[in-house]
Amino acid sequence: MNDQLFIKSAFSQKVERPPVWMMRQAGRFMKEYRAIRENYSFLEMMKNPEIATDVTMLPVDLLGIDAAIMFCDILVTAEALGGQLSFVKGKGPVFANPVRSKSDVEKMVIPETYEEFGYVFEMIKNVKERLNGKTPLIGFAGSPFTVMSYLVEGQSSKDLKLTKLMINTEPETAKLLLSKLATVTANYLNAQIEAGVDALQIFDSWANTLSWEDYQEFSHFYIAEIISKLNRKDIPIISFCKGSSVFHPIMAEAKPDVISVDWNADLLRVKQSLPNEIAVQGNLDPFVLYGSREIIRKKVMRILEKMRNENGFIFNLGHGIMPDIPFDNVKYAIELIQEFRN
Ligand code: CP3
């Protein structure tokens, strides 16, 4: 088994300090990212294995982070089912052909995995060479529910009105779409394992819009299906959702190795309420990283002290880094965590 700190903590083994990485660490808060981005669109960067490799390596080289996450996006599984994806400045992701009816979903064909995502697997192989066994690489995909929400809304939305309308007026259409996404996603994640990733994370960013029962029926059910299909071997599976403070007991039923917790919860209480073999990841509010060194130290140390000597703890944010967070603040937080000893 891989004896890196991150992998050990993900499997709830004893470590001298918690490992740290940060969601959305491969992105705009780094000037090196913005310099590359001046010459390419986000999609061009993502689909060019050399550039995607370079961007994946930035937080490893500049921050000495304990895990790399591949540079890609969760919406590639929506694209794989025929969604015409672009990223529009000031608006975010846009689908030119949003899903509006059952026949739109029936027309969707499950693609051949290697043909569809070849650029991702090539990047994974490049990154693994660059990392040279020193730092583990996290692969990922979006949860069917969160990806569905973009396909249905056609763009980012605050309340997921159209998605929740579909769930409540045409639940069978929603379920057909979710199950197609689950199939594509399980194939895609298994192929990431084959290409060499050391861990996987499933991102369910919009779960918090659902009721307890609808979360079970329209999100958890499909995540559990995906996890049950993965050839996990010694690959830890991390389940992230916004809403995990509430939904973690349901998330645990899908048997992930790690649950990534949003910033609302008392992380220790969540950890103690879960089965022993499930680790937690989290849960600093990313807004703390806009603060002074004094504030950053206080709030980072508060989590470290709370989780002292807990096996199965990975330091992360409750959600992704914002693009305008000062790089030096992120670096400072990571140094604090890496200096800490249990
Ligand atoms: O964590 C990492 O750094 C790895 C790369 C990664 C990206 N997106 C790169 C990205 C990961 C893991 C994601 C996940 C993702 N993408 C999620 C789930 C996590 C979350 O934050 O909730 C979601 C909902 C998306 C969809 C998406 N992609 C949106 C809504 C946007 C626009 C908003 C934004 O942040 O700009 C993107 C674009 C995107 N994905 C960028 C990056 C670096 C910005 C692209 C740019 O340079 O303009």
Image: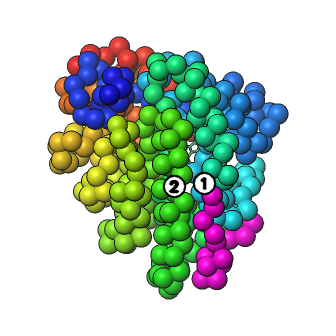
Q: Are marks 2 and 1 in contact (CB under 8 Å)?
A: yes
**Label 1 CB sits under 8 Å from any ligand 1 atom:** no
Quadrant location, the C terminus? top left
Q: Is residue 23 above or below residue 304?
A: below
Residue 254 position in % (x across, y down): 31, 57
Q: Is residue 73 a member of the stretch shown in magenta? A: no
Range drawn in magenta: 96-112
- In this view of the protein, can residue 298 be seen by the observer? no
Residue 323 position in % (x across, y down): 61, 36
The quadrant of the picture showing ligand 1 is top right
Q: Is residue 102 a member of the stretch shown in magenta? A: yes
The image quadrant of residue 62 is top right
* Image point (75%, 66%), residue name: 96
Q: CA distance from mark 2 to mark 1?
A: 7 Å
Query: Which of the labelled discs sits on residue 113, or is there none?
Result: 1
* Image point (71%, 31%), residue name: 51
Q: Main secondary structure of the magenta part?
A: loop
Q: Residues within 10 Å of mark 1 (few under 14, many from 20)?
A: some
Q: Is residue 259 above or below residue 69?
A: below
| Amino acid of disc 2 | Asn
**335 or 150, which lies in front?**
150
- In this view of the protein, can residue 188 be seen by the observer? yes
Query: Which of the labelled discs sits on residue 256, or is there none?
Result: none
Q: Is residue 58 left or right of residue 88?
A: left
Q: Is residue 15 above or below residue 221?
A: above
Query: Which of the labelled discs sits on residue 187, or is there none?
Result: 2
| Amino acid of disc 1 | Thr
